[in-house]
Structures are given as structure tokens and as C-alpha cells.
Image: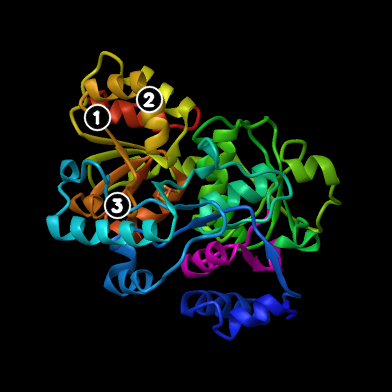
Amino acid sequence: MYLTNEEEHILNGEAGETLRKAIEILVALGDIYGADGLIPIKSAQIAGVSYKTIGDAGLEWISDLEGQVKVPAILNPAGMDLEDWERLRISPEFAERQKAIIQAYKKLGISCECTCTPYTLEGFSAGYGDHLAWSESSAISYANSVIGARTNREGGPSALSAALLGKTANYGLHLEENRIPEVSVSVECSLKESDYGALGYVAGKIIGSKIPIFHLKDTPEKDELKALGAAMAASGAVALYHVEGVTPEACRLGFEEPEEKIIIERSQLDEVYESRERAGKEPELITIGCPHCSAAELKKVAELLKGKTVSKETWIFTSRELAKRYPDYIRTIEESGARVVCDTCMVVSPATNNYSCVMVNSGKAFAYVPGMCGAESVYGNMEACIEEATGRKGKKAGGSY
Ligand code: F3S
């Protein structure tokens, strides 16, 4: 792998220990994956923030680093709402450790807005063709697929290293030839809203880490693409997908149809919704906002909850910036007794571990809650989640609902 003179100096430790460690990580990855050199990045998004997932070893590693990031860098959700951690019964010990992690990142010049939807924030845009180093799987999928930017599935340490250097190794999805669809997925039914999360959950299990091109009967909205990508990145390891006639590379580059073909039918999506009937227990907790709710999703939740009262614990996750931007939606949601929670989510917060059955409208949360939180997960569309929360039960959890 070619390094410039300046990069060689950094690798020799002449720019300090933090940058030496950072470039060592990137060069090691570059050598493994055949990179020809380092390329500049526009931004970094750094996972490995929740104390629940990185523990004391992670805190120690970050605390030892010095210097400042060279490009705009932002954090993934932490383990708690940083301004109001007590409301979800987080222990003071956990809160103390979590705050120390945030401080360690802040010291490096990283923005402590903790969200998996950085593309919704003002001043943190990514554009077509931009090289990025992002590390939360749904954000990676959105950046690659919906924006047409280029990022590999970075780990927390490699994204942080890239932020400190302002560069990443040039391999994998940074190269146009590695972004061509490998499997064609035809969906035989019409889709709306939470169907996309169910589709992603089903498709990810079949596709694994390949790059799919979808042929859909409908034109999905951005939030529906967000849900599709997040679910595929969780049940599989899909970091980039295309949708014929919709996503930017499919539109601009006009790919040839791959030989491998998959057909997905309505009955496969119905099986995901049937998790509600299959569950051995009643949901105790309802969660919406995986990935973090957009403005349109907050508006819809507010409309569905307006004038109602929840009878079950109900958490709506979004970024702090959007919560501040839309105080009317937040007020309406909280007047129902539901809580709007920022900086964290149902998967990376230890708060979810207090429940044994969680209802979600996200294919990603549906996939991760059992393993990460030790709770059964059941799937429904947003309306079904709100009906469960407000005690109006007995309806179908989604699909043709
Ligand atoms: Fe975001 Fe947490 Fe889901 S990080 S994508 S809300 S698992």
C-alpha cells in the first residue's frame, strides 16, 4: 500500500502516539483488503459509544487518545439519554461511565450528538460520490444506497482512526467496481411503510453480505428505504443495495441484471407480522425509532397519539436535534404518557433489558432485541404499535392492515 512521505512520518510516530496508532489500524486494514493507498474522507460516524457495548476496556482505549479529529465526526447512540438518563431507570454507576465515554470523545473534537441518522442533521450532509468512514450499519447502508456516498462497514476504532487522520484506506465500497449488484430481488407484492422493514428482515437473511438490486412495484419514500437498509444490515450484512429506478446509482449507472435471482412474496412478510400472534407473552414495552425517527415519523407518531393515553411503557427514539426542532410533536407525544428519548435506542440502552417482550416497528430492532436485550421481539406497523400502547388490541399487527 502506497503511503505519502507525510503518512510515513505519521506511521513512524513523528506526529505522536495517537496518530501512529490510528494510521497503523488503517494500514493494517488496507493491507488485508488490498488498498492502494489512503483517500480523504468528508466525515466520520463513530460507533462504540454505549457503555453497554464497549465496557471499561473501550472507555480506557478512547481515554488514552489525544489530538483532534480532522473532519466532521459524530457519535452513534449512547446507552442513555444524556440529559435525562434517570427517566429510563439507568443506574448512577452506568451513567457515570457513559458520561466519561462521551467526555473522552468530546475531547477529541467529536460532535456528541449521538444518532444513527446523521444524514438528517443540519451541517452533517453527505453527497453522491463522497468518501466517508461511517460505522453504524443502518447509517452505512443509507449513505451508500440512498445517498450514493461511499463507505465501508467501519468498526468503531477504524472510523475513529479515519476521523483523526481525515483519511481511510481505499478498498471495498470506495471502489466503483465493488458496488455492482450481485443478486436480483423481485418483490411480488405492493409494499407500504413497515412492510419495508419486514422485507429487509426477510431479504437480509437470504442475501447475507451480497449487494442486491430490488425490483419493486412501488416507489419507496426515504424513511422506507431507511427501514429496508437497516433491517438488511441486521438480519444479514448488507452494506449497499440498489432499487431499480429509485436509488441514485441504479438510476445513473444502469446496472446489468445479475444472474442470481430471488423472489420474495407477501406470505414471507406476513410471517414477520405474525410474530405478534406467535409470541408466548404480551408486549410490555413498545418502541418506535430504529433507526432514529425522522421529522415525518415524529409527526405521524404525534398524530396517532394525539388525545390518547398509553397504558404500556412506550419509548420513541429520535436525535436530540430533531427533538429540539419539532417541540410540538414532542409535546403531543409526551402528553399521551409516551416518552421521547434522545441520544440512545432500545438496542444499545440497558433499559430494555428490564422487559421480557418488546413490540417494534423496525426490522433491525426485531432482529437485535432478542440477542442484545434478552427480550422477545414482536413486529407490527406503527399503527399497531400505538394501538398496543394505548390498549386497543386485537387487530392485525400490520401487512394488509
Ligand atoms: Fe439506530 Fe439503535 Fe436501531 S443505533 S439503527 S436505533 S439499533
Q: Residue at x 64, y 34 (%)?
A: 189
Left or right for 234, reference 57: right
**Residue 201 visible in the displayed image:** no
Across and down, in percent, residue 186 comes to: 71, 44
Q: x, y percentage for residue 304? A: 36, 20
Kind of residue at disc 1: Ala
Label 1 belongs to which residue? 338
Residue beneath disc 3: 376
Name the residue furthest bottom: 12
- Name the residue: 76% across, 55% down: 181
- Tag 2: amino acid: Val
Residue 152 colored in magenta in the image:
yes
Q: Nearer the viewer, residue 49 or 211?
A: 49
Give the CA distance from mark 3 to mark 2.
23 Å
From the image, tell me which residue sits under label 2.
Answer: 301
Do the residues bearing badges 3 and 2 touch, measured as CB atoms within 8 Å? no
